[in-house]
């Protein structure tokens, strides 16, 4: 009789000990999670890079299913590529003080239209956005020309003679 009552008591103690251990572990993980959240809130670039991979996985999955179900996923892939390029152009245009604010506004509007473009019309409308991209790119280069000095790669000042000793 004593053996049957001892076993449940030891199991209860083990379960209680395991529960306490798990609760302590939970608290530690919640503190670490809270610290990570605080870090991501104070460093927006880290937050963007952390969450961007969700978007990429979603896009790749969507392209995959578009290809499987008989639709051309290449148009969707091009659309996502163009969206990415427009984001880069918008960032560059906003950072440069020499860019006309109207151009930045036009970039934003075109980007928003591209995002709202339905998948079934991409085959007919994507070329328009590609042409617009080239136009915006050209306008950005005209408004903020890069000086020739910035593009040149500096030449080696002197050549090393074969007789030179290496220290």
Image: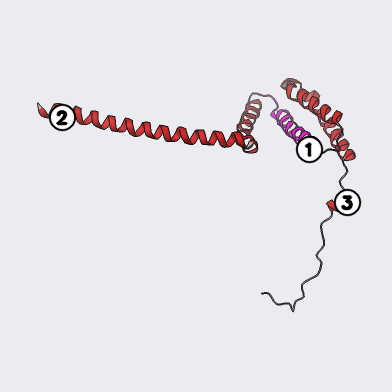
Vertical position of residue 126 compared to residue 42: above or below: above
Read off the residue under disc 1. 95
Q: How is the image coloured?
A: secondary structure
Residue at the location (32% across, 30% down)? Answer: 19
Q: In which quarter of the image is residue 8?
A: top left
Judging by the rendered image, the residue that carries numbered circle 3 is: 148
Answer above or below: position of 132 versus 144. above
Identify the magenta region. 68-96
- The quadrant of the image that shows the C terminus is bottom right
**Disc assigned to residue 6:** 2
Which quadrant of the figure has residue 59?
top right
Q: Please tell me whether mark 3 or mark 1 is closer to you in this view.
A: 1
Badge 2 density bin: few <14, some 14–19, many ≥20, Cα 10 Å? few
Residue 58: x and y, percent? 62, 29
What's the residue at 48%, 36% (across, down)? 32
Answer left or right for 9 relative to 72.
Answer: left
Decide if residue 31 is on the left or right side of residue 165.
Answer: left
Q: Nearer the N terminus, badge 3 or badge 1?
A: 1
Single out the residue that lies furthest toward the right.
142
């Amino acid at each position: 009789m004593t053996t049957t009552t001892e076993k449940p008591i030891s199991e209860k103690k083990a379960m209680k000990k395991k529960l306490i251990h798990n609760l302590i572990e939970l608290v530690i993980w919640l503190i670490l999670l809270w610290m990570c959240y605080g870090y991501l809130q104070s460093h927006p670039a880290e937050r963007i890079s952390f969450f961007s991979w969700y978007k990429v996985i979603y896009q790749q999955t969507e392209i995959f299913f578009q290809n499987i179900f008989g639709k051309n996923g290449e148009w969707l892939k091009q659309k996502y590529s163009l969206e990415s390029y427009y984001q880069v152009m918008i960032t560059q245009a906003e950072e440069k003080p020499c860019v006309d604010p109207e151009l930045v506004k036009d970039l934003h509007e075109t980007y928003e239209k591209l995002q709202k473009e339905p998948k079934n019309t991409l085959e007919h409308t994507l070329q328009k956005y590609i042409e617009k991209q080239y136009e915006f790119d050209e306008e950005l280069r005209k408004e903020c020309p890069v000086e020739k000095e910035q593009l040149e790669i500096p030449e080696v000042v002197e050549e090393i003679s074969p007789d030179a000793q290496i220290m």
